[in-house]
Amino acid sequence: MEENKLYFIKDEYFEKYKVPNTSLNKDTDENGEHNRPCYYAFKEDNIYWMIPISSQVDKYEYEYQKSIKKYGVCDSISFVYIKGNKNAALIQNMIPVLEKYIDKIYTYHNTNTPIEINDKKRKELNAKARKVVRFARIGKELTFTPILDFEKRLIEELNKEE
């Protein structure tokens, strides 16, 4: 598995970890697969930190601007272009995941080439996400998910497998 790419997460993870505000993947029909949002992945140790990507740009642009106005910075939301369209990277909703819960990479249908985010945005996402994790470790939560609780459970899961 390559980090800094976009992936889909297995339903098994969401069933086990009860991530707030998520739903299971929809069944495949005549129009193809219906996966939940894709997630941008970067790795630290044995944990992949997954940042959901949303097409609801207007909604998150408002939240982003509100944070900029109030704090002068917004570490919980960033914007990226995927397949030529602006999307919101929701660092505020990121989750830690083990590789076994990652379903598949997000690719262009006609070429099976992985969809990527440009280098500048990857560096920005990684820096913001690491900052949010550091803040969580000192008791300042910027996420809607209990990322440190999930991380602890994942580490315990890894230790049992060894």
Image (cartoon, rainbow, N blue to C red):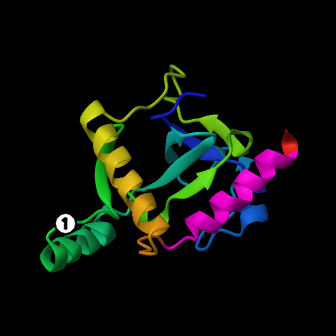
Amino acid type at image mark 1: Val
Query: Quadrant of residue 104 in the image?
Result: top right
Location of the N terminus by quadrant is top right
Kindly identify the residue that appears in the image at 78 percent across and 62 percent down: 16
What predominant SS class does the magenta segment belong to? helix
Residue 151 place in picture, x, y as percent? 64, 58
Q: In the rendered structure, does residue 133 fall within the stretch colored magenta?
A: no
Task: Mark yes or no: residue 36 visible.
Answer: no
Closer to the camera in the image, 9 or 43: 43
For residue 103, above or below residue 135: above
For residue 152, above or below residue 41: below
The tally of labels here is 1
For residue 47, above or below residue 118: below
Query: Quadrant of residue 147 in the image?
Result: bottom right
Q: Which residue is mark 1?
A: 73
| Magenta segment | 144-160
